[in-house]
């Protein structure tokens, strides 16, 4: 499985990493830290047996995609295991999702997850994963006390393998 993910500006990364660390300290669940998962927002999840064709199409995105801003307005949960920061779905995210989908949907050897197709995607930035019920309560508690809405700039796009997370390719977005 492969992920196409958006990455954030340095200040946003600093804040999001702080949230990840606070959740890990409060809950004892260090999944995000021990697996070295950087703050990111997955745009697409793709299955393929042909990594080279995926990389070739990913590189085409470099000339098409631009930086953009998102308002990270709230905290959400994917029950029962994940807590995340939630950006407001805006036109930039819609266009980003559509551009990525169109790029990879045209490849016969790939299958895009139904959860990452346009209009069925929940934009989110995972802060804690594989949480137990008790850990989720602790994560919510720490975010109730410390979360502050913010504007984040998406500055990079990456292609990664999962389990463990490993970047294959990554590029800065143009202005």
Image (cartoon, helix red, strand yellow):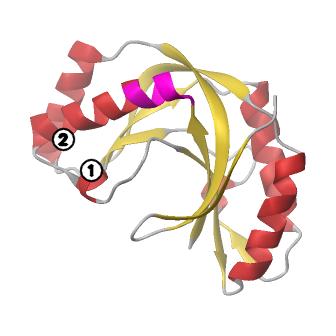
In the structure shown, which secondary structural element does the residue marked by tag 2 occupy?
Answer: helix
Q: In x, y percent, where is residue 129?
A: 30, 50
The answer to whether 24 appears left or right of 72 in the picture is left
Eyeballing the image, is 26 above or below 33? above
The residues tagged by marks 2 and 1 sit, at their Cα atoms, a distance apart of: 8 Å
In the image, residue 95 above or below residue 111 = above
- Residue for point 63% across, 23% down: 70
Placement of the C terminus among the 4 image quadrants: top right
Mark 2 and mark 1 in contact? Answer it, CB < 8 Å: yes
The residue nearer to you, when weighing 33 against 113, is 33
Q: Magenta segment: does it hold 12? A: yes
Report x, y in % for residue 1: 56, 74
Give the magenta-colored segment's residue range. 9-14
User: Mark 1 highlights which residue?
Assistant: 33
Give the quadrant of residue 8: top right
Please tell me which residue is depicted at 44% across the width and 21% down the height of the picture: 74
Q: Residue furthest bottom?
A: 49
Residue 135: image location, x then y, percent:
14, 42
Circle 1 sits in a helix, a strand or a loop, which is it? Answer: helix
Q: Is residue 128 visible?
A: yes
Residue at image point 49% right, 14% down: 150
Q: Is residue 47 left or right of residue 129?
A: right
Please state which of residues 99 and 166 is positioned toward the viewer in this rendering.
166
Query: Which one is in front, 157 or 76?
Result: 157
What secondary structure predominates along the stretch shown in magenta?
helix
Q: Earlier in the sequence, mark 2 or mark 1?
A: 2
Q: Residue 152: give x, y in percent of width and height.
A: 57, 22
Residue 114 shows which numbered tag? none
Residue at mark 2: 24
């Amino acid at each position: 499985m492969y992920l196409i993910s958006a990455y954030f500006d340095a200040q946003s990364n600093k804040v999001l990493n702080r949230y990840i660390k606070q959740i890990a300290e409060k809950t004892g669940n260090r999944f995000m830290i021990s697996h070295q998962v950087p703050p990111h927002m997955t745009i697409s999840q793709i299955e393929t047996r042909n990594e080279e064709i995926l990389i070739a199409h990913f590189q085409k995105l470099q000339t098409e995609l631009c930086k953009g801003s998102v308002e990270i307005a709230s905290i959400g949960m994917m029950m029962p295991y994940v807590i995340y920061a939630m950006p407001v779905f805006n036109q930039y995210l819609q266009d980003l999702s559509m551009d990525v989908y169109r790029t990879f949907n045209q490849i016969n050897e790939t299958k895009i997850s139904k959860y990452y197709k346009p209009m069925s995607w929940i934009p989110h930035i995972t802060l804690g994963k594989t949480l137990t019920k008790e850990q989720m309560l602790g994560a919510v508690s720490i975010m109730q006390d410390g979360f502050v809405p913010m504007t984040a700039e998406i500055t990079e796009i990456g292609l990664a393998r999962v389990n463990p997370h490993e970047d294959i390719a990554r590029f800065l977005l143009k202005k």
